Image: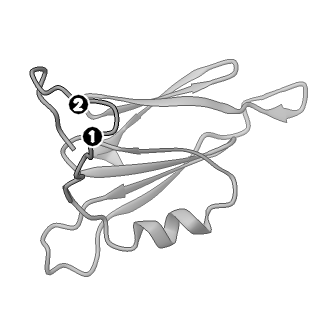
Amino acid sequence: MHASASTNVHAGASVCPQHYGTFAALSYIQASKREKRFMYVDPDMAVAVLAETQRRIYVYHQAASANSNTAAQSVVDLGGAAVAGETEEVLGIQLSGRMLVVLREHSVCTIDLDRC
């Protein structure tokens, strides 16, 4: 849903969302992740990212065409950068160009989405 700066929405006014894009089976995949913390879809609908509480980042690329049955998927394991025996938690994710920045408790990781 996009709104321009000149659009005024008043309390009680209805807003009609519009379909912008679909990632095939993403809702099924998202529902299966028990330790998910963040989900991010880039504005161009080229990639969707699911981040678990700690170690794993799941990267789902958009299918090449509407008729395609497959699309690239990657699992990025952030490893066991442990402090006092515990794995760091993921505190946030943000896309910057084609790099995904992952903020953790004691570190910052970058993931090049073109290499996933």
Residue 54 at what x, y percent from top left?
A: 69, 41
> Residue sitting at 26 percent across and 29 percent down?
10
Per the image, the residue denoted by label 1 is 13
Per the image, the residue denoted by label 2 is 9
Q: Quadrant of residue 103?
A: top right
Residue 62 at what x, y percent from top left?
A: 25, 61
Residue that sits furthest to the right in the current view: 84
> Residue sitting at 23 percent across and 30 percent down?
9
Front-most of residues 85 and 91: 91
Q: Is residue 43 above or below residue 5?
A: below
Classed neighbour count for the residue bearing mark 2: other residues with Cα under 10 Å, few (<14), some (14–19), many (≥20): few
Q: Quadrant of residue 68?
A: bottom left
Residue 39 at what x, y percent from top left?
A: 48, 46
Q: Is residue 96 above or below residue 17?
A: above
> Residue sitting at 16 percent across and 33 percent down?
3
Colour convention: one colour
Q: Is residue 112 above or below residue 105?
A: below
> Residue sitting at 17 percent across and 26 percent down?
8
Amino acid carrying mark 1 in the image: Ala
Residue 90 as seen in the image, left or right of residue 10: right
- In what quadrant of the picture does the N terminus appear? top left
The answer to whether the residues at label 2 and label 1 have Cβ atoms under 8 Å apart is: yes
